[in-house]
Amino acid sequence: MSARFCITPIRCLLCVFLFSTLAKANFAHPGVAHSQDSLDFVRRMVAEEKQPWKQAWEELEDSRFASLAWKPQPYPHVERGSYNNPNIGSSDFTSDGSAAYTHALRWALSGEAAHAKKAAEILDAWSSTLESISNKDARLLVGMSGHQFVNAAELLKHTWDGWPESNQQQFSRMLREIFYPIIQDFYPSANGNWDASMMQTMIAMGVYLDDQEYFDRAVDYYRKGQGNGAIRNYFKESGQCQESGRDQGHTQMGLEFLANTAETAWLQGVDLYGEADNRLLKGFEYTAKYNLGEEVPYEPYKSFEGRYHYRKISDDSRGRLRKMYEKVYNHYHNRRSLDAPWIKKAALKNRPESRAGGCLPWCTLMYANNPGPAVQN
């Protein structure tokens, strides 16, 4: 505790009160990607062998990421260069993040403690080993894969009593001392999926750490950040995306990261899905329609600071639907009763959305027709 709260460093009752008031926030837990109600719903659907949850659950069980033979591969110094070259521990970081989240989810839905222990083993291995993440794509790596580490930790911390407090604190130190300094200033001039990736991890860290400042920083950037990933910069009112003229793979990445950010905010009573007249819905509809073979309008678009100028829509990777549509369809159609016909077609074509081709896997299992909480703000 900082001594600035009192004349001497003695931990008086007043200091303890002030520190706890400043450090704590009123977050719902678990509450990064899943609430307790949503976990209970999925558990019930699987137990009743309802579809599509039954098939999605079987895919999770059969995944290599759910194997108890999984061995984490932590590195003290991770490097991710441009397009993952050089790759020094970067792919291991990503794979271990997927495994930690998958095991934590399998524990939370099945009650099999061996999977909670395996998730904790992976988190502990990295938090006790990692000292730095560097090179050109460090921000992107933490943004993309840090999100799964935080989701795994959130599930363990709030659904299992077997993760020692000292290990939780060790994990928190990794978030504060290694992850956050890398992503705290985003990357305004980069293509928007960079900013979006960092927002999803930062808001997740805010919830896990009960840190209102982290949470608010991500929310504020989503709403009115200067960079390409902010909601009004990543999309035109038509739904055209800042990266639509680049390629469809990166465009869908940006969309998914923004949706993950909005989902965490929703679970905490903040509606980012509806920001800028449901701009995220328009972006998903536009992109789904184009990738399902239909034509969409396009305007040449200069990015923030003019670094990128895409003059026509790109057909690079067109038709390769990313595993990301189930969550947003559930929100806009099931929670909000809004039309989302192209998102629906993409979600059904992808169903079940499993591990491959997305940032946060197992979306059919966790989001198909899942009522979740009603936002209160």
Image (spheres, rainbow, N blue to C red):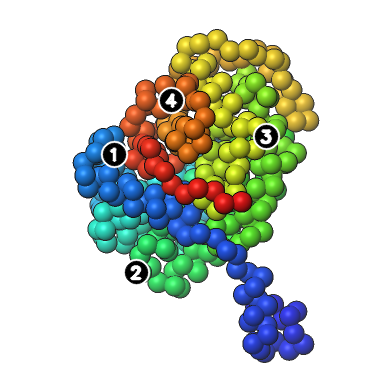
Count of marks overlaid on the render? 4
Instruction: Please name the residue that numbered disc 2 is placed on.
Output: 162
Of mark 1 and mark 2, the one earlier in the sequence is 1
Q: Residue furthest front?
A: 337
- Element marked by disc 3: helix
The amino acid sitting under disc 4 is Lys
On the image, the x and y values in percent for residue 223 come to 69, 41
Q: Few, some or many C-alpha atoms within 10 Å of disc 2 (few <14, some 14-19, many ≥20)?
A: few
Residue at the image point whose x is 63% and y is 82% from the top? 16
The amino acid sitting under disc 2 is Gly
**Mark 1 vs 4: CB contact within 8 A:** no
Instruction: Please name the residue that numbered disc 1 is placed on.
Output: 53
The amino acid sitting under disc 3 is Ala
Viewer-side label of 1, 2: 1
Residue 72 in sight in this render: no
Q: Give the image quarter of residue 215.
A: bottom right
Instruction: Please name the residue that numbered disc 3 is placed on.
Output: 276
Q: Which mark is residue 344?
A: 4
**Mark 2 vs 4: CB contact within 8 A:** no
Of mark 3 and mark 4, the one earlier in the sequence is 3
Of mark 1 and mark 3, the one earlier in the sequence is 1
- Element marked by disc 2: loop
Q: Is 356 on the left or on the right of 45, as rendered?
A: right
Q: CA distance from mark 1 to mark 4?
A: 17 Å
